[in-house]
Image (spheres, rainbow, N blue to C red):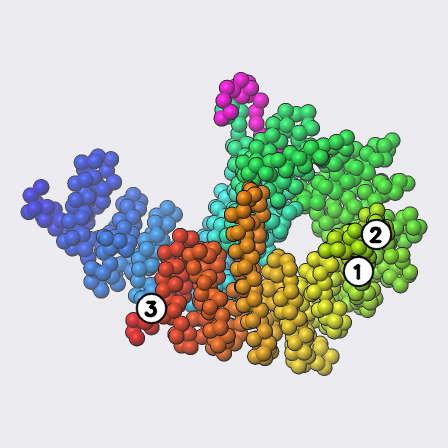
Amino acid sequence: MDSEVQQSQVAAILGADPSPFETLISHLMSSSNEQRSHAEALFNLCKQTDPDSLSLKLAHLLHSSPHEEARAMSAILLRKQLTRDDSYLWPRLSPHTQSSLKSLLLSSIQKENIKSISKKLCDTISELASGILPDNAWPELLPFMFQCVSSDSPKLQESAFLIFAQLSQYIGDSLTPHIKHLHDIFLQCLTNASVNPDVRIAALNAVINFIQCLSGSADRDRFQDLLPAMMRTLTEALNSGQEATAQEALELLIELAGTEPRFLRRQLVDVVGAMLQIAEAESLEEGTRHLAIEFVITLAEARERAPGMMRKLPQFISRLFAILMKMLLDIEDDPAWHSAETEDEDAGETSNYSVGQECLDRLSISLGGNTIVPVASEQLPAYLAAPEWQKRHAALIALAQIAEGCSRWAAINAIGQLSTDLGPDLQVKYHQGVLPALAGAMDDFQNPRVQAHAASAVLNFSENCTPDILTPYLDGIVSKLLVLLQNGKQMVQEGALTALASVADSSQEHFQKYYDAVMPYLKAILVNATDKSNRMLRAKSMECISLVGMAVGKEKFRADAKQVMEVLMSLQVSQMETDDPTTSYMLQAWARLCKCLGQDFLPYMEFVMPPLLQSASLKPDVTITSADSDNEIEDSDDESMETITLGDKRIGIKTSVLEEKATACNMLCCYADELKEGFFPWIDQVAGTLVPLLKFYFHEEVRKAAVSAMPELLRSAKLAIEKGQSRGRDVTYLKFLTDSIIPALVEALHKEPDTEICASMLDSLNECLQISGMLLDESQVRSIVDEIKQVITASSSRKRERAERTRAEDFDAEEGELIKEENEQEEEVFDQVGEILGTLIKTFKANFLPFFDELSSYLTPMWGRDKTPEERRIAICIFDDVAEQCREAAVKYYDTYLPFLLEACNDETPDVRQVSIRHPLFVDILNTIFIA
């Protein structure tokens, strides 16, 4: 085309008459290749000739055109010109044009009523802002967005949140100074049920993106209180039948589970429970249920970022496995399938079946054989023994997926365990009956054993059931169980009590309806079951009463609580035999009653605490003989006696004593946690009992309980002092307690043989430091730092030993699976080391730097390419804390650490790149070096 003609056309397009420009935009959308190519050439010529006029023309068309297609195309074109690539137009524009563009874009957001175009506009604004906001070249934008969020217009609110979401992805560092304001607006929007659903989804999108852009765990923790509201966005959408909205929410939450699984850790039980409830709800669309399953699978797969987190929820793994097994039953009896010549023919297979098969495979790979095989061995026998071909087929498919996902050793293990489990009592052990059928089975008065097993099946079924699933069946189930309670057979009564307890626990407030009918029977058993033969019956009545009380709540339970606790108090002062199960059940019942009554429980503490402390102080019942002695340890046939051989000694330990001790220790921790400052009067006694148990090597659960209790005791003391409930004691008492607990924890950590408990101790130590770390003196900080050195050294040594094991001749897949899990535990240790150092740096700031200097030789190797991504991420986060908390005093480390930080920006692991590139002080560091 003649250049003069082109120039003439360009002049017309960019002239005062809007028609030629509108025609150009129309031709850019033409289905004719020739017309579109010609328009593209003219558009590019306009960009080269007069970028100011072109940009303003696009912005005015976007702002004022009556044609939706033209506005949408203008938004797309404008975004492309403002994207920071080879065609980036912004720096070539005059200040006046730049100012006009910004104003027109913000005005267009307010004016545009078509949602799809509004979203394109948000994309354009976000693209421009990501390039100029860090330089403060658009100071009007954030105030405008905050104003939109606060407006009465759902359209503007949604647009603002969409922009916040994208800016969090592009330039999250520029938003972090506004973290408190953002937290407040997110919370306000997500907790307001009257807010438009689309706005809430946009807010959910924004908050999830913002959480992902935060590099520090402390900043992410500030958003923990939003998680329940984030989940309500999902559940309320489902409850109101808005499944499309719910599916959007699920997709966003899946993204969070994949990138920041640790954010979910503290509320993991509630979150995963809610997802499994959705997955189990057959009234929902398949797509919704599949997304809920995808969320849980994604969490299980997020091991690099949250090692072992899902494995700590075996009850949910079992529940998910059952859901996936049920999906494998969704297969039609298609004749074509029966005559299939190849294994990959999928005649009769549904989307449910395909998703179930894929997810079983992924679950097996992510959790490993040690976790998945016990679950499979529990559930698959019933499928294998069922008359329906679909169930037998599903069991075989599941075995195949486990074999593929966990490697050969797991398949062999699974088949071995399943063979052991198959037997005459198979239907009893692994029945998968529905609740109405179980209710019918409870009517079989000719066969009390059947009734007892039916009650047991109710227990199994309801244990992980949600109230929504149970509620329709409660009338029938509870009435049948009440009949069984009046049955003369103790076995049936015990089964009915346990089932009632489980049903109450699962149905929660829905059980209030049955309270008045049930409680008299429970109290009658508690009061009248006094014979030795009825001890377990009485113990189970305590369990049932306390769980019913927790389910229905304090107000409903209050009238009976006093009478029940009087009975428990009278039992407490009576002489019970050492093997009486009442003791252990009573300890747990008291703790549940405390949770139910809260501060109203305080008057009973003087009765509860003495025997509880006595149980916690029990000495292990140990018998020692020579390993080669012909004399067996007395009572070796006693199921409660465990025997281990150490060197030339055979040691027998009575486990029932240890279990009672562990229960008591857990209950002490529970009381401290529940009663907070109200627990103050017992701190001295409990600390005196539990601190020595940090090194109780006979029983892991005792040590774990003691470890968990340490921060609770400090927190109780601190709160009591702050609230004037410390009986005249002041901060010097907190200092005394800190001096008793933290050094003991550090010493126990030094001797702890179990890696998982080691990680728990580090976690507990970190909590203690957050509560009263400022009271430590230099020598105490020194001991913590020395122990951290030892922890890092010991962990590195264990990892080297594992690496050696992989080179052994007899190394196999089973050993590989074990090593993999052990290394994941090791990463949890490193994670906690990073958290402790972060707390110490935040507490002592520049005063901690001499200790940091000592640690450098231990931390620097963690940056190495031979280390795991998690170790590299932790090392970066530690340096982030130093740079952020110590500011000028930290400048001396930049020469050492900046090369590592720059290298980490190109790390193959997204998590490492993210904490490096989005480090809030990265620009400051570069500026400091270049200015210097």
Locate residue 652, reporting x and y percent: 79, 54
Circle 1 or circle 2, nearest the eye = 2
Contact check, label 1 and label 2, Cβ < 8 Å: no
In this picture, residue 178 sits left or right of residue 297: left
What is the magenta range? Answer: 325-344
Other residues around mark 2 within 10 Å, as few (<14) / some (14–19) / many (≥20): some
Asked whether 26 falls inside the magenta stretch, the response is no
Residue type (three-letter) at the residue carrying disc 1 = Pro
Q: At 87% from the left edge and 57% from the top edge, which residue is drawn?
A: 578
Is 621 situated above or below 510?
below
Quarter in which the C terminus is drawn: bottom left
Q: Give the quarter of the image for residue 280.
A: top right
Foreground of the two, 381 or 731? 381
Separation of residues labelled 1 and 2 (CA atoms): 15 Å
Locate residue 122, reporting x and y percent: 36, 53
In this picture, residue 44 sits left or right of residue 755: left
Q: At 23% from the left edge and 38% from the top edge, which residue is drawn?
A: 30
Q: Which mark is residue 886?
A: none
Circle 3 or circle 1, nearest the eye = 1
Is 796 situated above or below 486?
below
Q: Which mark is residue 620?
A: 1
Residue holding disc 3: 926
User: Is there any visible trace of residue 784 in the rendered image?
Assistant: yes
Query: Of marks 1 and 2, which one's residue comes earlier in the chain?
Result: 1
Residue holding disc 2: 633
Residue type (three-letter) at the residue carrying disc 3 = Leu
SS majority, magenta: loop
Query: Of marks 2 and 3, which one's residue comes earlier in the chain?
Result: 2
